[in-house]
Image (cartoon, helix red, strand yellow):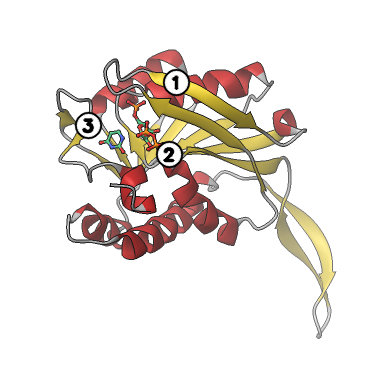
Amino acid sequence: MSQLHVIDHPMIQHKLTIMREETTGSKDFKELLNEIALLMGYEVTRDFPLEDVEIKTPMQTMVAKKISGKKVAIVPILRAGLGMVDGLLTLIPVARVGHIGLYRNEETHKPVFYYCKLPKDIQERTVILTDPMLATGGSASDAIDLLKEKGCSNIRLMCLVAAPEGVKAVQERHPDVDIYVAAVDEKLNSDCYILPGLGDAGDRIFGTK
Ligand code: PRP
Ligand code: URA
C-alpha cells in the first residue's frame, strides 16, 4: 500500500497558512509555494541511496557520501504544478523537467488531457510528480497512468493540500505511489474544491481570476 506522508514541519505549516489567506497576493503565493516545495523536497528525497566516494579536501583525502542510483525527473501537472518546480530545482539542480497538461472539466470535474512532453529517458528516472492540489485525485491518477505507460516505475506524488477523497482515490488506483502533502483538509465541496483549502491554485499563482 502506498504511504501518505504528511509533512508537518513548523516552517511548512506557517508558510501554508499565509498561502491559504485570501488576502495573500500572487507574488507572495508563488514565492511561498516554491519555498515549501524546496522544504518538502527534503522528505521526498529522504530515502535516496548514498555511495562512498573518495575526494580530496584542501587538507587530505577522505571517503565521503554522494547520492547514487537513479536520476530525477520533476514532472509538474500544468498549470499549478509549475509553481513547485523552481523550489525543487534549487534542491536538485541536475533534475530534468517534464510536463503533463491536464485541466478539470468544470461540469464533470474529470481531467482532460492536452499536453505531454517528458525527458527521453524518463523510465530510468525517479519521478517527482507535482501538483499543489489533490482534490478528487482524478488529475494525479491520470498523470500517473501516463507516466506508467511511458515505463516509469518509481513515482512520488508531491502535493500541498489534499482532500481525503483524493488521497483515497490515488491510493486505490496506484498503491505503489507514495504521496507527500503538507496538509490533509476536511472535504470537497459540491464543485469538487477542497475545504477549507486555498481556492484555485492555478488562478492564484498566475493571477488569472
Ligand atoms: C487543479 C489542480 C489539479 C486539479 C486537482 O487544476 O491544480 O491539477 O485541479 O483536481 P482533481 O484532484 O479533482 O483532479 P485545474 O484543473 O484547475 O487546472 P489548472 O492548474 O490549469 O488551473
Ligand atoms: N483545484 C484547485 O486549484 N483547488 C481546489 O480546491 C481543487 C482543485
Q: Secondary structure at mark 3?
A: loop
Q: Which residue type does callout 3 highlight? A: Tyr
How far is disc 3 from disc 1 in space, using C-alphas?
Answer: 17 Å
* Camera sees residue 148: yes
Q: Which residue is mark 1?
A: 112
Q: Which residue is mark 2?
A: 131
Query: What is the crowding at mark 1: few (fewer than 14 residues within 10 Å), some, or many (at least 20)?
Result: some
Q: Which residue is mark 3?
A: 193
Query: What is the crowding at mark 2: few (fewer than 14 residues within 10 Å), some, or many (at least 20)?
Result: many
Q: Secondary structure at mark 2?
A: loop
How far from the left and from the top, in percent, is residue 149? 64, 16
Sequence-first tag of 3 and 1? 1
Q: Is mark 3 within 8 Å of ligand 2?
A: yes
Which residue is pictured at 47% across the width and 50% down the height? 84
Q: Residue furthest bottom?
A: 59
Q: Is mark 2 within 8 Å of ligand 1?
A: yes
Q: Which quarter shows the N terminus?
A: top left
Q: Which residue type does callout 1 highlight? A: Val
Q: Is residue 101 above or below residue 39?
A: above
How far from the left and from the top, in percent, is residue 202? 36, 44
Q: Nearer the viewer, mark 3 or mark 1?
A: 1
How far is disc 2 from disc 3 in space, using C-alphas?
Answer: 14 Å
Sequence-first tag of 2 and 1? 1
Lateral position of residue 50 relative to residue 184, left or right: right
* Camera sees residue 2: no
Q: Is mark 1 within 8 Å of ligand 1?
A: no
